[in-house]
Image (cartoon, coloured by chain):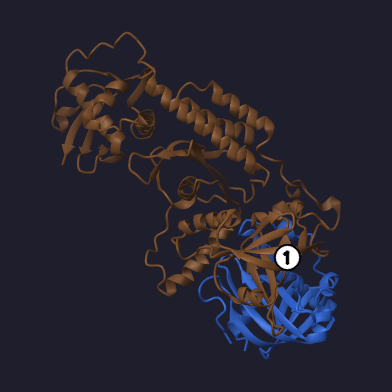
Chain colours: A brown, B blue
Amino acid sequence: MTRLESLASCFQGLIPATLFTCSREGVPNAAYISHVEFVDSGRVALSFQFFNKSKANICENPHALVRLIDPDTSQGWRLRLRYVRSETAGPVFDRMALRIEAIASYSGLKGIFKLRAADIYEVLSVEMIEDEGPRAASQWNERARPPASVFTLHAMQELSERIHRADTLEALLDSMLEGLEASCGFTHSMILMPAAEEGVLVTIASRGYPENGAGAEVRIGEGIVGVVAEARKPIRISGLIRQMLYAYAVHKQASEQGLCPHAHRIALPGLAAPDSQLGVPLINRGELIGVLCVESEQPYRFHEEDKTAIELLGGYIAIAMHSMLQRERSEPVADVAPAPALPTPAPVRAPGPTARAAKGPAREVAYYAADECILVDGEYLIRSLPAKIFWKLLNARQAEGRVEFTNRELRLDKSLNLPEWKDNLESRLLLLRRRLEQKCPDLRIVPKARGRFTLQLGSDVVLVQKP
Amino acid sequence: MIDVELAAFLQEGIAIQLGTRNERLEPNGVRVVSVAVDPDGRHIVAYVPDAAVAQVLPDLQSNGQAALVFARPPDERACQLKGTFTNARPATAAERAGVEAQWDRWLDRLASIGVARATLEPWITWPCTAIRLRVTAIFDQTPGPNAGAPLA
């Protein structure tokens, strides 16, 4: 019998499979199914989401047949199955439930489009379908050949070397995303970290998108990133477009029956139409340090054998990020010659024509205290702790003419209310720097030395505090 | 039973599979290249590649029970026809163009959801056996809470 493991590509869910069952009375049933899950060399699992005829038949007659298509070779396969049991917990259930939950959250279907059980089947035989496959080897083109594994040992070694070379959090994150492209070919990737606000993840580094994306937020439990953070387990989704179309079909029917009170859909972070996504939790000693998300416009990109490498990589990155944050906090501030203070403190000025400076039009920086949020020239810049930090820096510059600051003084500033333990200050400053680069590049925060940075303003700023 | 709108849907070039079962109630199934709905709306002809028809023909000839499932990406509209076997014959040369045109439209539709035509292009589509069924019931099978509701 052909080994089930050799059909790994069939289990990616790219091309719909078909499930055939039969009732006790002898009435056959056929249904398209979204996914067949590989369990082990002798078993597969099918998702039970809705109580339908297939499920009813299986409960009274355990015989089933599944037809699958290998997207790499075009070969069709028949699996003759016998239903064993339904699982509502455990690793197989968790894996299937997570993928379904991620798709559901994109479609506004959380709680409706969900896995009720993972139905486990014994595989009695694996048969090649004679009329569904390449007629001759010559017809196999490059595209049809199985793509090579992505996370090779060589790629992992290169990524590991990048981790060792990085000396700041910023360098580490950028180098990781650069390495994922150089060594693995992933052109679109991002890393999110827990935001100051509980239950929210914020994008701290990204690669391959038109804007750097810093500051884009995802709530825990939303989309692939949010679900990865919630479950702390990696998720791979191939053929995402097709699976989302399936979810939308459910959404449409459920909406018509009033089962979807909230019809909104959460915009996908990153690519507008990814067809494969991989989310990896970055966990160190049980603490969620962040989430790595890799996307591809190809419908099929990640392999079964990549899974172990992906989890290993996630562990490496998490340890490196954690150690970088800890080091920044514990090491003394580097001694450098202090930057001269501004000749005269910039006066507080009201917005208006008088605020124009020789450098160009002055920028209005407005801080909304109630929302802890900063707008620059009426456009949203940042909120929460990074906003409070930026406001403090601008005010210190204006009142005292200072342009150089240390992490230590921010930590000691009671008005910022930084937690004494694990304040993630370095990541907040990085986020602020990235947002400034994106929205107003003439206002800059430039690292000067370890634990020390300067505020550089290419325009005059007018500070406006709002309630 | 099959109205004009449904007949157009079934024949527009979508995914079709035929399910049967043997005397031990073990299911069998094959891909259907195309279908043709009889003008009476009560019968349907499923064209199954000769290379595959042995998977289901013995079942049909012994117990006659059949299920045809249809699904259309990208909206995932789907339905299932239950039927009983009437007869089987070799499809004629005159039918070939219509059968292959429907299969060709299906390949185009697959491409719209990211599955390249080349993936299924090598599959055998001819010669076919024309399997005629009498339709006994039709069920909605679009994913969601309505799946399984009778349409006729």
User: For the point 66% across and 39% down, which residue is it?
Assistant: A150
Q: Give residue A178's quadrant in the image.
A: top right
Which of the two residues, A250 or B93, is positioned nearer the viewer here? A250
Left or right: residue A268 compared with residue A402: right
User: For the point 36% across and 34% down, which residue is it?
Assistant: A435
Across and down, in percent, residue A51 comes to 56, 73
Q: Give residue A168's quadrant in the image.
A: top left
Which of the two residues, A156 or A270, is positioned nearer the viewer here? A156
Q: Is residue B112 above or below residue A57?
A: above
User: For the point 50% across and 28% down, which residue is it?
Assistant: A320
Q: Looking at the figure, which quarter contains the C terminus of chain A?
A: top left
Across and down, in percent, residue A414 comes to 22, 29
Residue type, mark 1 in image:
Arg
Determine which residue is flagged by label 1: A67
Across and down, in percent, residue B145 comes to 50, 74
User: For the point 57% across and 59% down, which residue is it?
Assistant: A243
Q: Give residue B81's quadrant in the image.
A: bottom right
Q: How many marks?
A: 1
Which of the two residues, A221 or A136, is positioned nearer the viewer here? A221
Across and down, in percent, residue B38 comes to 70, 87
Q: Looking at the figure, which quarter contains the N terminus of chain A?
A: bottom right
> Which chain letter goes with mark 1?
A
Left or right: residue B76 compared with residue A289: right
Q: Is residue A73 above or below residue B82?
A: above
* Residue situated furthest bottom in the rendering: B40
**Residue A8 visible to an observer of this rendering:** yes
Left or right: residue A326 compared with residue A138: left
In terms of secondary structure, where does tag 1 sit?
strand
